[in-house]
Amino acid sequence: MPGAAVAAAVVVLDGDELVVVEPAEAPSSPTNLGSAPLATVDLAAGARTVLASGPDAVAAHATAVDEWRALTARWLVGLGRESQAIGVQYAKDRKQFDVAVGSFQAVQHRFADLATDLDGADLLSNKAVWALDVGDPVGTSFPAMAFWFAGDTAQRTASWALHVHGGYGFMEEYDIQLHFRRAKATRLLLGDPKRELQLLAGRLWDDPESGPVPGSRLRPTSAYGAAADEPATAATASDADGGFDFRLGAEVLDFRREVREFLGRHVTPEVIERAHHTGTIHDNGLHAVMAEAGWISAGWPAEFGGQGRSPLEMNALTEEMYLSGAPVDGLGVASLVAHTLLIDGTDWQKRTIIPEILSGKALCCLGYSEPDAGSDVAACTTKAVQDGDEWTINGQKMFTTMAHEAQYVFLLTRTNTEVAKHKGLTMFVVPMDQAGVSITPVHTMGGERTNITYYDDVKVDDKYRVGEVDGGWKVMMTALVFERNSAWYGELVRLLDHGLGWARSAPSPTGGLMVDDPLVRERLARIAVGNEISNLLGWRAAWMASEGTLPGVEGTMAKLFTTEHYQFAGNELIDALGTDGLTRHGDPTATAADGWIEAIYRHCQVTTIYGGTSEVLRGIIAERGLQLPRNR
């Protein structure tokens, strides 16, 4: 029993009796992996007091164990944090090949992944404690989630920090070996950690009265696609006492319901299928009614015709759009360009182009990537030459998604070859109807259409230049702030809903339904945990913005975790379907989730690339978040 070696008495569930046992002699305390105060207690020896019996005793014990799970998860986060700090400091101090170990990209990337997971575990374990404290309707699921994920993260963090120390980490005078042993030992105190996932699956899907499922829009007994009332536990905020409150508040929830009702009327199956069939994840009719309703400009101040919605309300809007399956690529890019123009644009651009975008009259596409410059956008070779008040642009851009629908391209060009490559760039917002602009479609594995765009002696007035000449890198950095968000969380929820719908209807080869199969339940439970963490990381960045705090790497962490988890979830579910998952969506013979899991599996692969590849994001987290030395 945990702690029994140093306790005067232990409280245990013996059958259906909750009893206090005061051992007659010191309990047997074996030497153990974690050097922890564990002991075996003879329940028949010593003073014994019955506290309760029957169902009430069983329920009280279950609540106490859940409190232990939640509080131990908090302890495991602390152990993980300290392991990370020890490992990072050693990586900064230790020199190999005349440079700090922490400057090696492989080392940085592992630290970045673990730092992101630790932040997720921190938020999730806080939510578990909070949910038990306030009696949240789905609170019983969070302690199991938190204990499993915090334990897994702490173990992996301590293991990596030990590895970074090399042979020194195995020497007993180094603390990291003790952290490593305790992380593993603590995970095992309730038995095989995978049993926690089975317990979680039971709490999520076996009790029809347990309410909405975290990480899903479903109630436990519904079919996929049936929306439940959203639990008011999606956001995180510190209160005046330094605690946490994960409720959104009445104003945000009211707005969320309004948006959901609107989308329920306008995001029809026909709209979704048309976008999937054409590969253009945009619908002009939907975009027009959203503009008319004010959703495109909802977060903008009244002077721009906006509603002045808060960052929390705007995060709710974005989340609901993706939860509904709305094809809104055009809206997302247009919003990014408009916000960038608000900060770096000229007065004319603010008076002319921003209103066109916010009214729904103009769409935008991004002209960043080139054949030989993907993530390294500063290697741009598309050239812009100035002649008085006019520029001539020549070059080629890859992956200009929405170019065939857009009125403007946000175009990065090379204007100076005599300086460092990132200092010789200039940004333009170029009308797509200019002579010399041409478009070639590219159809992708994920079913989406993107484009190659060509610029042959395109003449552009200087009024379309954004920012200073050779100041394009600064404009790019502004745009990136608005590009990395938690939009994919909604897609994760829809993926889990498809998986649950399949599992509840498909027969298992061992009898019953797939939702009863332990292998399937474990996969679904792991996905639900990751979905919840994705949700929390995204809302954390929104909450910081609502408090007037500029997020550092928090948005980057949300994007990294969510898209990596999206790929993990897609892979797990298509594996669970086996050959039933091979039939593509749209084929009339597709029966397993109508082929949507197969479609999502193809689509999710690209999400770790656009908006910043996972490798680039890991470098940012390592260098800016953990202050590891630069590797270049």
Image (spheres, helix red, strand yellow):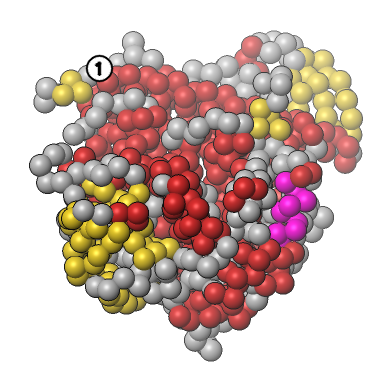
Magenta-span inclusion, residue 256: yes
229 vs 111, nearest the viewer: 229
Is 506 placed above or below 189 here? below
Is 546 placed above or below 488 here? above
**Residue at 34% of width from left, 25% of height from top?**
627
**Residue at 10% of width from left, 42% of height from top?**
418
Magenta-span inclusion, residue 174: no
Q: Main secondary structure of the magenta part?
A: helix
Residue 552 in view of the camera: yes
Relative side of 585 to 448, left or right? right
**Picture quarter with the N terminus:** top right
Res 632 quadrant in image: top left
Relative side of 61 to 591, left or right? right
Is 469 placed above or below 628 here? below
Determine the secondary structure under disc 1: helix
**Residue at 48% of width from left, 50% of height from top?**
350
75 vs 564, nearest the viewer: 564
Write down the residue under mark 1: 93
Is 402 placed above or below 298 here? below
Q: Give the extent of the magenta segment.
A: 252-260
Residue type, mark 1 in image: Asp
* Count of numbered marks: 1
Q: Where does the image place residue 285, in percent across and percent down from the top left?
A: 59, 76
Q: Where does the image place residue 50, in percent across and percent down from the top left?
A: 88, 25
Q: Where does the image place residue 590, in percent across and percent down from the top left?
A: 53, 83
